[in-house]
């Protein structure tokens, strides 16, 4: 009887273990299903809000880009619009202040201004701050690149 009792105990233990395993898996699956349903419900509840926020951010960005390009015709623009050259990135404008007068009158001075247009609460990017610092520290120079004539380039 000892061997038969031992075999029965082992079989009962194995059956109990298998039953516990399937019961545990069932609870895990039920919990996963419940959380999956909660997530789907959350997505449905918040999708419109997320889309609206995304569209508003996109509009804000687009308005900022438009404002950057039309800045020379706005009343706050303190330079001659003909002196402004839009480059867009990494800064918005290089202004050759006084250039139009020199072109017309052949006298006067030109100063060069790097101008970044910001709308609302936006701030300079890290790169723009580095450019600002380079200008303030007078890390600016002039270079002329002289290209060879076409005949010299062919050889």
Image (cartoon, rainbow, N blue to C red):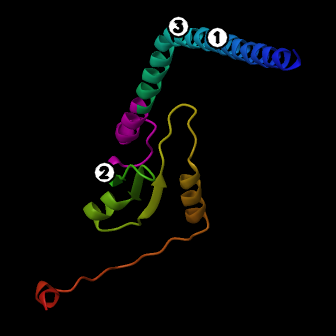
Position of residue 12 relative to residue 88, above or below, is above
Between discs 3 and 1, the one toward the N terminus: 1
Q: State the image coordinates of residue 14 (x, y, percent, origin top left).
A: 74, 18
Residue that protrudes farthest toward the right in the picture: 2
Mark 3 = which residue?
Answer: 45
Residue 82 numbered tag: 2
Between discs 1 and 2, the one toward the N terminus: 1
Q: Distance between the residues labelled 1 and 2?
A: 74 Å
Residue 34 occupies quadrant: top right
- Front of the two marks 1 and 2: 1
Name the residue: 57% across, 70% down: 138
Q: Is the magenta stretch mostly helix, strand or loop?
A: helix
Disc 1 crowd, CA 10 A, few/some/many (<14, 14-19, 20+): few
Q: Is residue 65 magenta?
A: yes
Magenta segment, which residues? 62-82
Q: How far apart are marks 2 and 3 (CA)?
A: 51 Å
Please state which of residues 37 and 3 is positioned toward the viewer in this rendering: 3
Residue 112 occupies quadrant: bottom left
Contact between labelled residues 1 and 3, with CB atoms less than 8 Å apart: no
């Amino acid at each position: 009887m000892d061997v038969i009792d031992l075999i029965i105990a082992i079989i009962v233990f194995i059956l109990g273990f298998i039953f516990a395993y399937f019961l545990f898996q069932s609870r895990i699956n039920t919990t996963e299903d419940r959380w999956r349903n909660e997530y789907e419900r959350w997505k449905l509840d918040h999708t419109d809000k997320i889309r609206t926020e995304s569209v508003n951010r996109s509009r804000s960005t687009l308005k900022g880009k438009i404002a950057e390009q039309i800045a020379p015709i706005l009343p706050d623009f303190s330079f001659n619009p003909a002196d402004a050259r839009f480059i867009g990135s990494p800064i918005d404008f290089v202004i050759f202040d006084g250039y139009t007068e020199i072109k017309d009158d052949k006298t006067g001075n030109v100063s060069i201004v790097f101008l970044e247009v910001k709308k609302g609460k936006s701030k300079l990017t890290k790169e723009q701050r580095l450019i600002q610092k380079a200008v303030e520290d007078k890390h600016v120079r002039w270079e002329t690149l002289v290209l060879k004539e076409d005949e010299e380039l062919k050889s």
